[in-house]
Image (cartoon, helix red, strand yellow):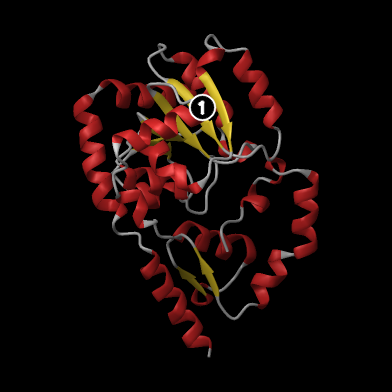
């Protein structure tokens, strides 16, 4: 189970998505399950709090990071990806579907508070209420400096992360936050939400901010862009922390749950 965002914030989901969750009935499924594997301690707490699932039935198996994210992409290959995607020379990167839960509206507002020293590149599918983001971006002081790329193939993402000045991830609610881990592994400084499961991933290896505070988000991004020493400290700490999250460990924990059931 990834998270209970659909329970905490139903308004973040389309009517079709809410209807789907009603049909699937996760509450009933979780209450009758012999064991549940979740991606974070936060989601485990949510299951105990929202569904009343006994703690002993829930096991945390953190997600892993693809080893390709740790490998440096050659400069020429990064240039080719940048040309093909139309990337600006310096940019703040946001990765995640265009939907209210990701809080991209606050990121656009924060970017508008910054001096025009870096563009904003937003990667993700248009899932729900994306038109609001497009309209908001068009009304900013620098609309030409906000780029919506849509879906980007997995093969291009290491170059995308590694060419970014920082990753901004101000999500309201996450069960894990895989883009944060991918950025950390890629050597890209992270400014992320202090809410829900994201701090479990970032630890002290990134700058955590209140997702409801646009000024704090803008200040944090500005600091990462301007302070070379801060950038290097974050990059060094993030590389070490990201190595703790492996798919081998995810598989080991999940396998132990399955063996116990058998």
Asked whether, in this view, residue 193 is left or right of residue 101, the answer is left
Given residues 236 and 2, the one toward you in this image is 236
Q: Residue at x 80, y 53 (%)?
A: 19
Is 261 placed above or below 71 here? below
Residue 173 percent coordinates (x, y): 55, 45
Between 202 and 98, the residue placed more toward the observer is 98
Task: Please report the residue visible at 53 percent of the width from the left and 20 percent of the height from the top.
Answer: 146
Q: Position of residue 103 (x, y in %)?
A: 56, 34
Q: In the image shown, does 213 or 175 lie closer to the viewer?
A: 175
Image location (x, y in percent) of residue 247:
40, 65
Q: Image height check: is 128 above or below 222?
A: below
| 87 sits to left or right of 99 | left
Q: Does any portion of residue 212 appear in the rendered image? A: no
Asked if residue 209 is positioned above or below residue 153 in the image, the reply reads: above
Question: Label 1 neighbourhood size at 10 Å, few (<14), some (14-19), many (20+)?
Answer: many
Look at mark 1 in the image and give the residue it sits on: 107
Disc 1 secondary structure class: helix
- Judge left or right: residue 217 versus residue 105: left
Residue nearest the observer in this picture, 150 or 225: 150
């Amino acid at each position: 189970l990834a998270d209970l965002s659909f329970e905490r914030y139903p308004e973040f989901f389309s009517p079709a998505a809410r209807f789907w969750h009603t049909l699937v009935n996760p509450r009933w499924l979780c209450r009758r399950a012999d064991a549940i594997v979740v991606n974070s301690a936060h989601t485990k707490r949510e299951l105990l709090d929202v569904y009343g699932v006994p703690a002993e039935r829930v096991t945390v198996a953190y997600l892993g990071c693809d080893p390709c994210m740790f490998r440096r992409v050659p400069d020429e290959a990064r240039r080719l990806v940048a040309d093909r995607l139309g990337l600006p020379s310096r940019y703040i990167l946001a990765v995640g579907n265009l939907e209210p839960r990701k809080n991209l509206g606050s990121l656009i507002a924060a970017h508008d508070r910054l001096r025009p020293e870096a563009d904003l590149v937003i990667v993700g599918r248009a899932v729900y209420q994306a038109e609001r983001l497009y309209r908001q971006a068009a009304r900013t002081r620098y609309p030409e400096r906000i780029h919506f790329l849509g879906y980007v193939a997995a093969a291009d993402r290491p170059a995308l992360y590694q060419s970014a000045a920082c990753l901004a991830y101000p999500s309201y609610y996450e069960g894990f936050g895989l883009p944060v881990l991918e950025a950390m592994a890629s050597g890209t400084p992270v400014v992320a939400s202090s809410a829900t499961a994201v701090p479990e991933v970032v630890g002290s290896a990134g700058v955590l901010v209140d997702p409801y505070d646009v000024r704090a988000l803008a200040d944090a991004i500005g600091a990462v862009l301007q302070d070379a020493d801060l950038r290097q400290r974050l990059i060094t700490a993030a590389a070490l922390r990201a190595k703790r999250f492996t798919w081998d460990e995810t598989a080991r924990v999940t396998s132990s749950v399955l063996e116990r059931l058998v």
